[in-house]
Image (cartoon, grey):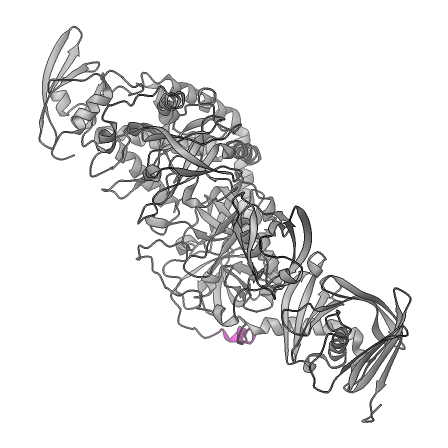
C-alpha cells in the first residue's frame, strides 16, 4: 500500500507541472518525503500527540458543517465552512450546496442556524455566509493566517462524508504539504473552477463534503481552505489541493465589510469558464499571481519551447494579447485560456523601453 | 539528500516565506535529532511488542481472509463478522512467528460486525493489552495493523499510522444490518484485508477493531476515513461471544427524534418495554443514557449500539423540568432467524464492482461464500452446530462450568422432596415457606398467607407485586435439586453488570413452561449471587439477590436474600431453619 500511495502522489504532483519541470518536481517529491520522514512522523510521539490533541480542541469549534441544496446523483448536499468572525461570518467554497435560498449551518456545539450568502468571488471559488450569532470562536484572518512550505505537517478539518452530525466535532486528518504550486486547470484534464496558487497535500483531504474545511499547521495556524474533489481525467488520479488563505483573506474581509467588488464584471460567466491553456503550454512561467492586479511579468522561459523560439525573455511584461490590453496575470490567463487548439495569438511585450511583438500558436497536443 | 534540502534556496525569487519556513524546518530537524531517533525507536519497539498478537486470517478454503487480534493467551481472537462469515467454521491463522494455526469460530455479533475465534494448539499465545476506547482523543496517534490486500504471506502484519479523526461516530447500516455505533474514525490507512485487525494507540494498547471505511467513488482503497469498532463495545460483548451464540444488539423499545432545541425526545414507545414500565413516555426528553449526556439522536444510537440485549442501562429523562433516573432493560433487536450466518451479507461484491462499498472487506472477494472445507480431524470435536449458535460447543462448555459451581448445593440434590424453610424478615416478621410438589406456600407474620398450586395452572404473581416470588422459589428448587434436566432449555448467555451497576456476573438462562429464569454467577467467586424469574415475557421479573449461604444440618442453603420487583423491594429474608423431607411416594 505504501508503494501504491507514493506512486500516486508522485503522479499527482507531476500532473501539476509541465514536462520541462519534472526534474524539479522529483526533487520536490524527495524533499517532501525526506522532510515528512524527518519532522513529520519522527517527532517525539508523546509531545506530538499532546500538541495535536490541543490543536484539534482549539480548531474544531471554528469549523462548521453546512447543509444545503443538492443530494441528487453524485451531488452531496453537505459541505464545510470556516468561522472568520465572532458574529458568524463563514468562509466556504462556492458550490451547488449554496444554490438554494439559504443553507443550514451547524456549529461545533450542535446549534443550528440559517446561513445566507453574503457574497462570493467565483474566480477564487469563494463564498461568504452569515449566520446570526454572537461570541463565536473564529479564525482571526490577520492574526492567525500563516504560510508554509513543502514538508510541513498539516491537519485538515472538515465535514467529510457527513460523518459528524449535531454537536459532534468535524473530522481531522493529518498530512504533509507535498508542494506549493499553481493549480493549472485545463479542459479535459482538470475541470477546476479555481486557478491559482495551491498547497498540494499528500493525504486525501478533498473528499465529499470536505470543501470549505480548513488546513492548519500542527499548532493550529491557518493555512488555507480545502478545495473541491478534483480528478485528472487522463491519469484518473485525484488531487488534494488547498487554496492558501493569503489568496482568500482580502476578498473575505472585503465581503465581510461590504467593500467587495468581484475581480471581473462578468463573474458569473467567468466562474464557469474553464481555461483551456495556460502560459506554460507555450513555455512561459509568469510571476506568482499574488494580488488582484499582478502585472503579467514573465518569470521564466522554458528552453526549447515556442516561447523561447519566439524570443521571449525573462522579465518581459506582457501588455497586449491580440490587441487587447492585458492589465494583469489573471487577464492574460483568461486570454490564453480561451484559445482553441491551433489558434494563432499575438503577444506584445515590453522589454526595457521597447515593445516587442511575437507570434505564438496554441498547441494541438499538450 | 543534501541536494534536495538545498533546493529551496535556489531561484525562488519573490517567495522569501519559503526560505523562512524552510530555515525553521532545518533548525527544528537538527534540534530534534536525538529525540526524533528516540521516538522512532520507541515506536518501532511498540510495534515489535504488539505485532505478535496480530492475526492474519485465511479461509480454510484458501480464498479470502482478513485480520484479527489475540486478546488472551488461551487463543481467543477478535475479528469482524464479515471476515469470518465467508471463512467457514474452521480457518487458518498466521502469526508473525511464521506459523499457521488452526482456529475455530466461537461466537458472532452480526449487527456489530464482530466475531470471536479461538486459535488452537497453544495456551501461551501472545495477546494484546486492552485499552479504554472511551479515553481516546481526537488527534492522538493510531496504528492499524493487519493483512491489507492479503499481502502478509509470511504473516508479518502491515502497519499503517494515522491520527484519530473522530470519536463516538455513528455509521448507519450500509446495505445490511451491520451497524457501526460509537466507533473510532481514523485516517490510518484501512484497506481491504485490514478488516478485523487491531487499531492500537501510541502506547500499544488495543483501542479498536478496524472494519469499515468510507470509500465512495474512488474504488475500494483507503481515502482517509476508516472506522474501528471501539474495544469497549467489544469487551461488553466478549462473554456473550464466548457463549458460542449468535449475539444480538438491543433496542430500548422506543424511538427518539432530535427536537428543535437540539434535545432528544421520545417519539414512540412500546407499552410492553421495560422503559415504559419504568415510567418513560412520549415527548419525554432523554438527558442521559448509559452514563453519557445525550445531545443528538446519533449519540443515543451510539449508546444503544454498544450494549448486548438483556443488559440494564441507566437512563435519565426530563419531563416538565423534573429529571428522573431509571434503569431500563434492553431488549433484543432481531429475531434469531434474521441473524443466521450468510443472512447479513445479501450481495456479494467483488473488487471489480465500481459501486461505493463501505466495508473494506477482504481481497480478493471476501463476501463470496466459500466452499465448506472439512474440519481438521484433530479439532473437529470443538464445533457443534445448533440453530441460534455460531458454535454450541462453547455454550455447553460454559454451562458445565456454571453447573459445576453449584456443587456446594449438592446436599439439596434429590428428585422428590419437600422444602420447608423459616426465618425472619428485616421488619421483624416471621416467615415460613413450603415448597412441595403439589404447591408452594408462604406465610408471613400472622395474616400474610400466599399459595401457588402446582396443578398445571398458570403461575401467578403471588404475592402480588413480587413478579411471582413463589414461582421464583420453585425455580430455585428446580435448579438446585434437579439441575439442567429440570428445564426445557438451558443457555449460557454471557455476562452483564449485576442490576446494571454491579460487578459483572455470568448469566445462565433457563426456560420451563412459560417461566424464564436468569441465574447470576459472580465472575470472581463463581458463586450464585441471585436470579430473576419471569412469569412471562415483558413483565417485571421477580429479582432475588442472595447475600449469604449457610450450613443447615450439613446442607448449604441461601441464608439471606432480598426480593424485589420493578424497583420495589418486597422484603429481605433471613433463613434460620431448613427442613428437606424426602417424599417416599407419600402425600403430605
Magenta includes B385? Answer: yes
Height in image: B359 above or below A224?
below
- Residue A80 seen in this snapshot: yes
Q: For the image shown, how many numbered marks are present on the structure?
A: 0
Residue at position x 69%, y 79% from top? B484
- Residue furthest bottom in the image: B585
Relative horizontal placement of residue A356, taking residue B41 as reference (left or right)? left
- Residue B122 seen in this snapshot: no
Residue at position x 68%, y 65% from top? B506
Q: Quadrant of the C terminus of chain B?
A: bottom right
Location of residue A309 in the rendering, given as x and y in whole percent from the top left corner: 11, 21
Q: In which quadrant of the rendered view does residue B545 lie?
A: bottom right
Location of residue B557 in the rendering, given as x and y in whole percent from the top left corner: 83, 73
Location of residue B474 in the rendering, given as x and y in whole percent from the top left corner: 75, 78
Q: Quadrant of the N terminus of chain B?
A: top left
Relative horizontal placement of residue A228, taking residue B224 as reference (left or right)? left
Residue A139 vs residue A294, the one in the foreground: A139
- Residue furthest top in the image: A353
Magenta includes A15? Answer: no
- Residue furthest front in the image: B320
Height in image: B166 above or below B269?
above
Residue A118 vs residue A212, the one in the foreground: A118
Residue A311 vs residue B212, the one in the foreground: B212
Residue at position x 49%, y 24% from top? B28
Location of residue A226 in the rendering, given as x and y in whole percent from the top left corner: 38, 34
Relative horizontal placement of residue B216, taking residue B127 as reference (left or right)? left
Question: Which segment did they paint magenta?
Answer: B374-387
Height in image: B459 above or below B291?
below
Amino acid at each position: 500500500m505504501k508503494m501504491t500511495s507514493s506512486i500516486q502522489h508522485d503522479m499527482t504532483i507531476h500532473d501539476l507541472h509541465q514536462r520541462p519541470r519534472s526534474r524539479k518536481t522529483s526533487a520536490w517529491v524527495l524533499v517532501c518525503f525526506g522532510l515528512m520522514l524527518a519532522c513529520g512522523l519522527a517527532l517525539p510521539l508523546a509531545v506530538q500527540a499532546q500538541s495535536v490533541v490541543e490543536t484539534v480542541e482549539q480548531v474544531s469549534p471554528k469549523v462548521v458543517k453546512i447543509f444545503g441544496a443538492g443530494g441528487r446523483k453524485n451531488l452531496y448536499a453537505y459541505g464545510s465552512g470556516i468561522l472568520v468572525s465572532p458574529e458568524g461570518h463563514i468562509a466556504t467554497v462556492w458550490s451547488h450546496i449554496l444554490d438554494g435560498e439559504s443553507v443550514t449551518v451547524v456549529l461545533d456545539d450542535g446549534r443550528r442556524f440559517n446561513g445566507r450568502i453574503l457574497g462570493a468571488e467565483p474566480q477564487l471559488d469563494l463564498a461568504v455566509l452569515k449566520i446570526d450569532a454572537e461570541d463565536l470562536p473564529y479564525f482571526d484572518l490577520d492574526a492567525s493566517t500563516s504560510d508554509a512550505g513543502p514538508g510541513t505537517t498539516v491537519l485538515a478539518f472538515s465535514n467529510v462524508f457527513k460523518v459528524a452530525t449535531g454537536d459532534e466535532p468535524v473530522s481531522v486528518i493529518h498530512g504533509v504539504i507535498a508542494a506549493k504550486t499553481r493549480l493549472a486547470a485545463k479542459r479535459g484534464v482538470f475541470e477546476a473552477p479555481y486557478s491559482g496558487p495551491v498547497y498540494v497535500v499528500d493525504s486525501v483531504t478533498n473528499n465529499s463534503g470536505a470543501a470549505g474545511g480548513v488546513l492548519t499547521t500542527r499548532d493550529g495556524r491557518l493555512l488555507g481552505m480545502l478545495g473541491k474533489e478534483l480528478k485528472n481525467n487522463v491519469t484518473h488520479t485525484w488531487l488534494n489541493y488547498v487554496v492558501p488563505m493569503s489568496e482568500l483573506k482580502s476578498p473575505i474581509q472585503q465581503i465581510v465589510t461590504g467593500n467587495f467588488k468581484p475581480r471581473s464584471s462578468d463573474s458569473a460567466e467567468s466562474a464557469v469558464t474553464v481555461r483551456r491553456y495556460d502560459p506554460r503550454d507555450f513555455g512561459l512561467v509568469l510571476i506568482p499571481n499574488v494580488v488582484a492586479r499582478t502585472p503579467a511579468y514573465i518569470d521564466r522561459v522554458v528552453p526549447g519551447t515556442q516561447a523561447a523560439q519566439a524570443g521571449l525573455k525573462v522579465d518581459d511584461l506582457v501588455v497586449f494579447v491580440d490587441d487587447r490590453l492585458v492589465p494583469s496575470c489573471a487577464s492574460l490567463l483568461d486570454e490564453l485560456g480561451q484559445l482553441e487548439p491551433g489558434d494563432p495569438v499575438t503577444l506584445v511585450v515590453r522589454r526595457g523601453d521597447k515593445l516587442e511583438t511575437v507570434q505564438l500558436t496554441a498547441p494541438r497536443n499538450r | 539528500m543534501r541536494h534536495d534540502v538545498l533546493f529551496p534556496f535556489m531561484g525562488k525569487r519573490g517567495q522569501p516565506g519559503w526560505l523562512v519556513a524552510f530555515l525553521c524546518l532545518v533548525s527544528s530537524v537538527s534540534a530534534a535529532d536525538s529525540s526524533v531517533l528516540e521516538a522512532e525507536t520507541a515506536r518501532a519497539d511498540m510495534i515489535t511488542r504488539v505485532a505478535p498478537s496480530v492475526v492474519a486470517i485465511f479461509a480454510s478454503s484458501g480464498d479470502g481472509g482478513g485480520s484479527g487480534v489475540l486478546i488472551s493467551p488461551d487463543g481467543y481472537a477478535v475479528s469482524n463478522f464479515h471476515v469470518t462469515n465467508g471463512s467457514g467454521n474452521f480457518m487458518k491463522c498466521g502469526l508473525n512467528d511464521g506459523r499457521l494455526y488452526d482456529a475455530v469460530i466461537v461466537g458472532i455479533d452480526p449487527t456489530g460486525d464482530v466475531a470471536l475465534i479461538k486459535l488452537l494448539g497453544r495456551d501461551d499465545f501472545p495477546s494484546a493489552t486492552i485499552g479504554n476506547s472511551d479515553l481516546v482523543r481526537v488527534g492522538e496517534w493510531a496504528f492499524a495493523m493487519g493483512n491489507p490486500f492479503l499481502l502478509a504471506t509470511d504473516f508479518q502484519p502491515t502497519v499503517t499510522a494515522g491520527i484519530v479523526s473522530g470519536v463516538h461516530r455513528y455509521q448507519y447500516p450500509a446495505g445490511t444490518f451491520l451497524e457501526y455505533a460509537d466507533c473510532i474514525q481514523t485516517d490510518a490507512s484501512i484497506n481491504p484485508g485490514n478488516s478485523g485487525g487491531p487499531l492500537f494507540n501510541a502506547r500499544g494498547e488495543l483501542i479498536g477493531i478496524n472494519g469499515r471505511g468510507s470509500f465512495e467513488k474512488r474504488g475500494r482503497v483507503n481515502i482517509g476515513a476508516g472506522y474501528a469498532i471501539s474495544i469497549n463495545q467489544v469487551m461488553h460483548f466478549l462473554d456473550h461471544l464466548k457463549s458460542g451464540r449468535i449475539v444480538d444488539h438491543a433496542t430500548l423499545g422506543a424511538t427518539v427524534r432530535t427536537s428543535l432545541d437540539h434535545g432528544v425526545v421520545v417519539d414512540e414507545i412500546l407499552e410492553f418495554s421495560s422503559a415504559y414500565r419504568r415510567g418513560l413516555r412520549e415527548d419525554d426528553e432523554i438527558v442521559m443514557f448509559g452514563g453519557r449526556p445525550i445531545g443528538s439522536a446519533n449519540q443515543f444510537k451510539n449508546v444503544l449500539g454498544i450494549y448486548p440485549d438483556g443488559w440494564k442501562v441507566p437512563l435519565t429523562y426530563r419531563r416538565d423540568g423534573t429529571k428522573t433516573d431509571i434503569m431500563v432493560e434492553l431488549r433484543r433487536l432481531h429475531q434469531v432467524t434474521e441473524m443466521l450466518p450468510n443472512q447479513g451479507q445479501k450481495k456479494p461484491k467483488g473488487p471489480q464492482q465500481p459501486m461505493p462499498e463501505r466495508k473494506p472487506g477482504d481481497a480478493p472477494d471476501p463476501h463470496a461464500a466459500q466452499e465448506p472445507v472439512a474440519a481438521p480431524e484433530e479439532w473437529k470435536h470443538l464445533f457443534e452446530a445448533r440453530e441460534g449458535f455460531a458454535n454450541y460447543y462453547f455454550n455447553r462448555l460454559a454451562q458445565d462450568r456454571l453447573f459445576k459451581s453449584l456443587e456446594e448445593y449438592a446436599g439439596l440434590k434429590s428428585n422428590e422432596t419437600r422444602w420447608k424453610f423459616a426465618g425472619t424478615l428485616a421488619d421483624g416478621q416471621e416467615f415460613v415457606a413450603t415448597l412441595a410438589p403439589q404447591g408452594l406456600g408462604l406465610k408471613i407474620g400472622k395474616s400474610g398467607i400466599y399459595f401457588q398450586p402446582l396443578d398445571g395452572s398458570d403461575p401467578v404473581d403471588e404475592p402480588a407485586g413480587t413478579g411471582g416470588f413463589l414461582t421464583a422459589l420453585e425455580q430455585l428448587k428446580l435448579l438446585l435439586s434437579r439441575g439442567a434436566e429440570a428445564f426445557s432449555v438451558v443457555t449460557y448467555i454471557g455476562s452483564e453488570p449485576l442490576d446494571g451497576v454491579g460487578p459483572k456476573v455470568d448469566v445462565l438462562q433457563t426456560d420451563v413452561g412459560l417461566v424464564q429464569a436468569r441465574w447470576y454467577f459472580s465472575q470472581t467467586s463463581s458463586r450464585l449471587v441471585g436470579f430473576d424469574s419471569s412469569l412471562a415475557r415483558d413483565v417485571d421479573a421477580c429479582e432475588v439477590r442472595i447475600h449469604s449461604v449457610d450450613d443447615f444440618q450439613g446442607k448449604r442453603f441461601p441464608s439471606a436474600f432480598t426480593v424485589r420487583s420493578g424497583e420495589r423491594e418486597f422484603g429481605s429474608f433471613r433463613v434460620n431453619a431448613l427442613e428437606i423431607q424426602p417424599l417416599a411416594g407419600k402425600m403430605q
